[in-house]
Amino acid sequence: MTAAHTEAAGLVAHVVRHDRDVDVALTVGPAECVALIGPNGAGKSTVVDAVAGLLALDAGEVRSAGRLLADPGRSVPAHRRRVGLVAQRPDLFPHRSVLANVAFGPRAAGRSGREARLTARQALAAVGVADLADRAPGTLSGGQAQRVAIARALAADPAVVLLDEPTSALDVGARQEVRAALRSAVAGRPSLLVTHDPVEVMALADRVVVLEDGRVVEEGRPTDVLARPRSAFAATFSGLVVLHGTATSDGLVLDHPTTTDGTATGAAPDGGGSLASGTHGVPPGRAVSAAHHPTAALVTRADQDGTGLLRTVTGLEPRDGLVRVRAGELTADLTLAAVAALGLTPGLRVRVRVPPAELTVWER
């Protein structure tokens, strides 16, 4: 990374922890929100804790706006890093009012009581909870308490904002309001968002970094990573099915079946045919990847006329009001009525295809 790039970046972190087998380097622009996603144990919490000052480095460094916060020989204390952390739980001081909770940061930084209270009221207004200033934390709903926690982070005027699964403990109704507050928190600041929610990524992030086994395996704009995932986790995260095969003049033929996590099964293809018609502009014979949503897949019985890849139904699973039909490495989400009409049962031979408009294909 060049010196100029380091100066321009809001946050530059290279986090190395040998005991956790984590070696992650990432950069966050001065007004950029980067979503950090990956399976449990991938290293997300290690990166967040290192940036926050809660975990020492074995190698690498952490810089904020060019200021060195940590390397293997030194570490600026967490309270002097100007890092605002919004975690899963608000953890408000129960014996202080909402206003006093939010004013705590600026007061601890040396501001007068009057200045701290003014800053706190501005932060509460920014996230839409100014009317809660005199309330006790114990009287707040989960969504209200989390918005107060966001205001508390803003009031401390952080140079970097860390959002560690900030809506995971909330019900669906509260998440939308909290996301609006989070947009205020990340505006104009380098921000790192850890989340398992694709909606949150699309709503807040400018870029996505995917971790697996303590390493960066993919990164890019949310629309690119979620629509054309190249890693197994990104495919699972986006809810898409990603398959690998070869473009033909008639469509896409899978060379080797893969499991739902994108790994090869080693088995021979179960049957001929194409997943979809058309080549999507890819010359025949090229190795390609293809992504589609499970609801886009069309299933017909093999004993009826139709097109698509010939497979055997291996499982039927209820899923979010639909039935997930697994046929080898292929996956389709159908309504219960459609499953009943087709008479689908494990062991039945079927054909699976995807309309060309529903399939995104790219060369590998």
Image: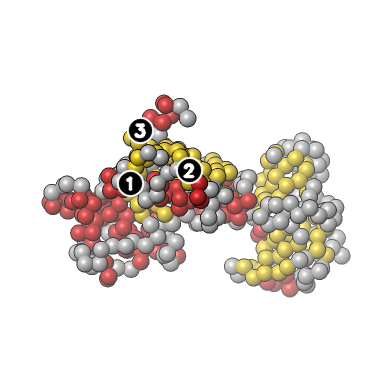
Estimate the x, y position of residue 86 in percent, counting from the top left: 36, 54
Estimate the x, y position of residue 214 in percent, counting from the top left: 54, 48
**For discs 3 and 2, the disc positioned in front in the rendered view:** 2
User: Counting residues from the N terminus, which is met first, the one under dot 1 or under dot 3?
Assistant: 3
User: Counting residues from the N terminus, which is met first, the one under dot 2 or under dot 1?
Assistant: 2
Look at the numbered disc 2 and give the secondary structure of its residue: strand
* Residue 92 relative to residue 51: left or right: left
The mark found on residue 66 in the picture is: 3
- Figure colour scheme: secondary structure
Which of the pair 156/200 is nearer the observer?
156
| Residue 35 can be seen, yes or no | no
Q: CA distance from mark 2 to mark 1?
A: 20 Å
Q: Is residue 169 above or below residue 16?
A: below
Locate the C terminus and report the quarter of the image it occupies: top right
Residue assigned mark 2: 16
Estimate the x, y position of residue 348 in percent, counting from the top left: 82, 68
Q: Quadrant of residue 237?
A: bottom right
Q: CA distance from mark 1 to mark 3?
A: 14 Å
Q: Residue at x 40, y 34 (%)?
A: 9
| Residue 97 can be seen, yes or no | yes
Amino acid type at circle 1 is Val
Residue assigned mark 1: 83
Q: CA distance from mark 3 to mark 2?
A: 19 Å
Amino acid type at circle 3 is Gly
